[in-house]
Image (cartoon, rainbow, N blue to C red):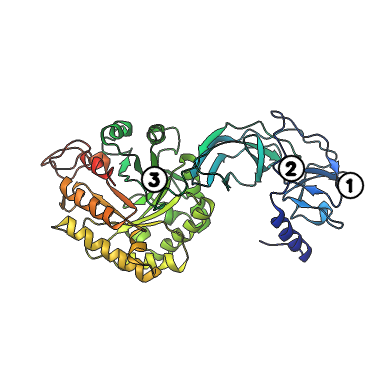
Amino acid sequence: MKFRSRLIAWVAGLALALTGAGLTAAAPAAYGAAQQLAAAWAPWTSYAAGAVVTHNGVDYVCLQSHTSQPGWEPPNVPALWKQGSGGGGNDTTAPSVPGNLRSTGVTSSSVSLAWNASTDNVGVTGYNVYRGGTLVTTATGTSFTDTGRAASTSYTYTVRARDAAGNLSGVSNSVTATTSTGGGNPNPTRMPGAPYLYMGWGNPPNPGTVMDATGVKSFTMAFILSSGGCTPAWDGQRALTGGADEQAINTIKSKGGSVQISFGGWSGNKLGPNCSTPQAYANAVQQVINAVGPAVVDFDIENTDEFENYTVQDRILNGLKIVKQNNPNVKVVVTFGTTRTGPNSHGIRLINQARALAVPIDNFTIMPFDFGSSNMYQDTVNASEGLKNALKSAYGWTDAQAYAHMGISGMNGLSDQQELTSPATWTQIRDWANSRGLTRLAYWAVNRDRPCPGGGVVSNCSGIAQSDWEFTRITAGF
């Protein structure tokens, strides 16, 4: 962060230490109402973020809560005050109402929120976030994590936009989220079994039908690609909201399930090569998180354009640092190919670089297929042990710590190279993953979880004899 003078740097540091003081007493103003005429700025006065004062005939809005002192007049400390409309408050137009307020994740002590940006005739300067009608913060972006909450407790939130003149928008929709049970999960990084579901390919089934038949609670939704430049879309062509993908996700959530969103894959126009910087990549991912509200984001880093291009690989990794910082309750997974004995040189490099860059990756998932196996169970175990050893070497972890950061993503029935994973083999793989404490299990794909013995490698069935949704039912036991 840059400051214009030593005074501003010192004031900003003090203001940050005082952030949050005096906020809980404020309550939402009436729907769409503009603020009353501002009081004159005065020293030795406690000001909350969002407060509006006047000084020498100009209005200012408080950026960070603080207690004023002589010499801290608003024009002198831009780290604390931003000039409003001036001239006694001529701007009386309130911002539009923030849209689609939603919970993007919970822990036993926090609730993460996101909403769609408001518009204003001059400009939106922040968003007031209310818990049960009490102002808890003024956020400058379109997301906020409310920490320090009690476990197993429901909280209701609303949001209002604020402009520089102090005008407040109407109240957003309310959202209620319940924190998770404290201390009941021995491995909080564990994710439910989540097979891939692709709504643009292979006669996609209704996920609600599959959930009812199998008990599965989560799906990995594929794939987010570039629709041109650094703009994300389902399969590079379907809008993030309003289509079959959103309908499927809403169905899953309405039945108590969760979703993982997968970016990339083997083919297609991907975001990694198209986003010019880590920040741009993180911004594209954030668009998807805001639109979908996933529990997990999965980055399938494959092929020569991402996996083997180290410039792009680093861009993605550095982007994931930003994603995790802005969404601490959303788990981050990287998925990549493997040999029968563990990651190849590109995979080893990915792991070591993630460690060197301090990227907070929750899970490293390998895809143990398409390597010419005649024994899919044993080769999957061997590949996983190779991944474990690579993680131990990079991070200095114990076996248990490495397993707790590992996942397996298989391919049901016949693979592209005619390798056979039967339901019995997939059950063995699942049981081994459970016994070692792995934290992710997926397979490609629910679309193929239907019988067609002798049908070959196709998009809408497994190529083998099986029951409908048999691999999904096994995966639900993870």
**CA–CA distance between discs 3 and 1?**
54 Å
Residue type, mark 3 in image: Gln
- Left or right, residue 53 beside residue 104: right
Judged from the image, the secondary structure of the residue bearing numbered disc 1 is: loop
**Within 10 angstroms of label 1, few (less than 14), some, or many (20 or more) residues?**
few
Of the numbered discs 3 and 2, the one sitting upstream in the chain is 2
List x then y, in percent, for residue 63.
72, 49
Determine which residue is flagged by label 3. 260
Determine which residue is flagged by label 2. 164
- Left or right, residue 319 beside residue 147: left
Q: Which mark is residue 189?
A: none
Up-down: is 252 above or below 341? above
Q: Residue at x 81, y 34 (%)?
A: 36
Residue type, mark 2 in image: Ala
List x then y, in percent, for residue 83.
78, 47
List x then y, in percent, for residue 292.
46, 40
Dividing the image into 4 quarters, which one contains the N terminus? bottom right
Q: Does residue 390 show up?
A: yes
- Left or right, residue 363 beside residue 120: left
Q: Nearer the viewer, mark 3 or mark 1?
A: 3
Determine which residue is flagged by label 1. 56
Residue type, mark 1 in image: Asn
Of the numbered discs 3 and 1, the one sitting upstream in the chain is 1
Up-down: is 449 above or below 420? above
Judged from the image, the secondary structure of the residue bearing numbered disc 2 is: loop
**Within 10 angstroms of label 3, few (less than 14), some, or many (20 or more) residues?**
many
| Contact (Cβ within 8 Å) of mark 1 with mark 2 | no
Q: Does residue 127 show up?
A: no
Q: Nearer the viewer, residue 201 or 111?
A: 111
Q: Nearer the viewer, mark 3 or mark 2?
A: 3
**CA–CA distance between discs 3 and 2?**
38 Å
**CA–CA distance between discs 1 and 2?**
17 Å
